[in-house]
Image: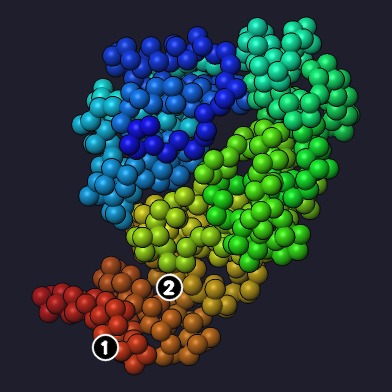
């Protein structure tokens, strides 16, 4: 394998057909035509775009020194995953605070070296890749996307559903059966859609059923789903039906596996860390969820069961297809959707580092970022505001601010402020902490008037809660002083710094880093005042 490799998917042992597409992709990437060095695999969900990229990566691994997988659905996750390559390459910029600096360093390295493959998986908007595609013709890029409009950025490769002969070949290979007529009938009912074919084949293999028997089951279940109006947002009932058949079986045989899938449905599809379950889940959750997801042995059984029915893929991390996630969420009544979305938030919150300013914690934050954003997105759409939604939003915002993703950080802080104001009231210390963070990122964005207002509010709340000489008040005052300094209100800024310095000296001591930092800010301001 290449010395640098982070593909989150195992190679599919049942990969069948698609040889023309695999060969076309490889030939284009090795043709030395500049436009062909970026291949954009596009098509609807479930046709196997990601599987095609995975197969190329494994089949041609020997041709590369670096194979790097980037989750590209969310721009901030795209930036974090791309920047993560800098750590593996031990680039000096890898610990820079601004991700833009790291991204530029990675791009330069790619332009100066050969023998690499970058996969951008599930790109929503082609424009999102503008700053990431290297200019030099030194390596290969594969993009997967539902968007077909790649002219000028990449050479598009349309991935259709399987041709019938490939679908039949796949079903026979996947199930070990020989009835070609039954395989053809089932493939037709499934629309030759690879994801549906895989789920059907996995179910038949797991239950030792027949192709004809599954077709009867599929038709009956589909009629039931259509009668109930249970359709997923992106698919005309095919994947929902194959998923429903498998899930009902899992739910009957292994209820805790169903619980695991319910949680995964509210996280990002790829790279779900096993570490958020086990002991961490036992501490973060309660009741049956804690028992199911908090016991490592039970968790392993659940993973094996879901893999058996091809409901998730598992390696070092877990992966669930987006359509499977959508079907899982769609099946739940609203109150259960709220429950499982909240469970997902609690698990990610328990795993998300406390000190997001610590460079050593950034890899952990980066790995959890996609899952935090996914879970938080679901609780927002479901109007779930219970603990610890505000806390996770605040932590994610603080991490994004530390990486100079200021607009994304601002959005997190504003949501967190709204949630915690409603939950705790306008004068709670949690509200002060978020107002403080929001004020700082508004300062970063140059909105000094709003920054001042939020920081003054933080001072008022913390003074009322803790008294005038508490370290939290000093932190607020120091940040307010910095904004006043930027506004040119030097006398007011000096008063804030002097008061903060006095509090830190009395409470933390002369040599504490907080004390030293305020002293440096105050000395700098005084030097400016003298020059003025």
The numbered dot on residue 365 is none
Q: Assign the C terminus to one quadrant of the image.
A: bottom left
Instruction: Residue under label 1, please give it.
Output: 510
| Sequence-earlier tag: 2 or 1 | 2
> What residue lies at 40% left-to-right and 77% top-to-bottom?
476
Q: Quadrant of residue 516?
A: bottom left
Residue 341 x, y percent position in the rendering: 67, 52
Q: Residue at x 69, y 35 (%)?
A: 308
Foreground pick, 78 / 276? 276
Q: Is residue 46 above or below residue 88?
A: above
Residue 455 circle label: 2
Q: Quadrant of residue 174?
A: top right
Q: Residues within 10 Å of mark 1 (few under 14, many from 20)?
A: some
Q: Residue at x 50, y 74 (%)?
A: 432
The quadrant in which the N terminus is found is: top left
- Residue 223 at x, y = what percent? 87, 25
Quarter of the view holding residue 438:
bottom left
Residue 351 in view of the camera: yes
Task: Establish if 67 lies above or below 487.
Answer: above
């Amino acid at each position: 394998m290449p010395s640098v490799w982070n593909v989150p998917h195992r190679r599919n042992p049942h990969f069948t057909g698609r040889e023309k597409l695999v060969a076309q992709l490889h030939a284009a990437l090795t043709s030395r035509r500049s436009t062909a060095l970026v291949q954009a695999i596009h098509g609807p969900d479930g046709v196997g775009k990601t599987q095609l990229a995975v197969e190329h990566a494994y089949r041609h691994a020997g041709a590369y020194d670096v194979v790097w997988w980037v989750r590209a659905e969310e721009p901030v996750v795209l930036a974090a995953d791309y920047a993560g390559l800098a750590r593996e390459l031990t680039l000096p910029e890898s610990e820079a605070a601004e991700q833009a600096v790291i991204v530029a360093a990675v791009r330069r390295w790619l332009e100066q070296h050969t023998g690499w493959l970058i996969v951008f998986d599930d790109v929503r908007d082609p424009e999102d890749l503008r700053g990431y595609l290297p200019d030099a013709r030194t390596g290969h890029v594969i993009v997967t996307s539902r968007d077909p409009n790649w002219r000028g950025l990449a050479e598009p490769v349309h991935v259709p559903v399987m041709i019938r002969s490939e679908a039949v070949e796949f079903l026979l290979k996947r199930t070990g059966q020989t009835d070609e007529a039954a395989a053809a009938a089932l493939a037709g009912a499934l629309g030759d859609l690879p994801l549906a074919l895989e789920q059907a084949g996995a179910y038949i293999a797991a239950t030792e059923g027949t192709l004809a028997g599954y077709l009867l089951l599929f038709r009956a279940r589909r009629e039931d789903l259509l009668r109930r109006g249970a359709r997923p947002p992106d698919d005309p009932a095919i994947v929902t039906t194959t998923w429903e058949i498998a899930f009902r079986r899992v739910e009957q045989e292994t209820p805790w596996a169903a619980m695991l899938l319910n949680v995964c449905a509210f996280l990002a599809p790829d790279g779900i860390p096993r570490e958020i379950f086990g002991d961490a889940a036992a501490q973060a959750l309660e009741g049956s969820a804690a028992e199911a997801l908090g016991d490592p042995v039970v968790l392993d059984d659940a993973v094996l069961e879901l893999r058996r029915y091809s409901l998730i893929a598992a390696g070092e991390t877990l992966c669930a297809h987006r359509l499977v996630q959508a079907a899982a969420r769609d099946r739940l009544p609203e109150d259960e959707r709220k429950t499982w979305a909240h469970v997902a938030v609690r698990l990610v919150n328990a795993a998300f580092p406390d000190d997001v300013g610590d460079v050593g914690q950034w890899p952990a934050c980066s790995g959890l970022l996609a899952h935090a954003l996914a879970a938080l997105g679901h609780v927002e759409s479901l109007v779930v505001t219970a603990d610890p939604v505000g806390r996770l939003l605040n932590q994610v915002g603080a991490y994004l601010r530390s990486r100079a993703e200021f607009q994304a950080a601002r959005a997190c802080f504003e949501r967190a402020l709204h949630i915690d104001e409603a939950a705790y009231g306008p004068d709670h210390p949690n509200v002060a902490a978020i107002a403080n963070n929001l004020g700082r990122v508004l300062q970063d964005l140059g909105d000094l008037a709003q920054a001042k207002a939020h920081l003054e509010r933080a001072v008022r709340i913390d003074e009322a809660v803790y008294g005038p000489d508490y370290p939290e008040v000093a932190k607020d005052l120091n940040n307010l002083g910095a904004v006043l300094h930027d506004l040119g209100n030097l006398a007011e800024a000096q008063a804030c710094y002097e008061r903060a310095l006095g509090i830190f000296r009395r409470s933390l001591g002369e040599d504490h880093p907080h004390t030293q930092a305020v002293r440096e800010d105050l000395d700098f301001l005084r030097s400016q005042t003298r020059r003025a």
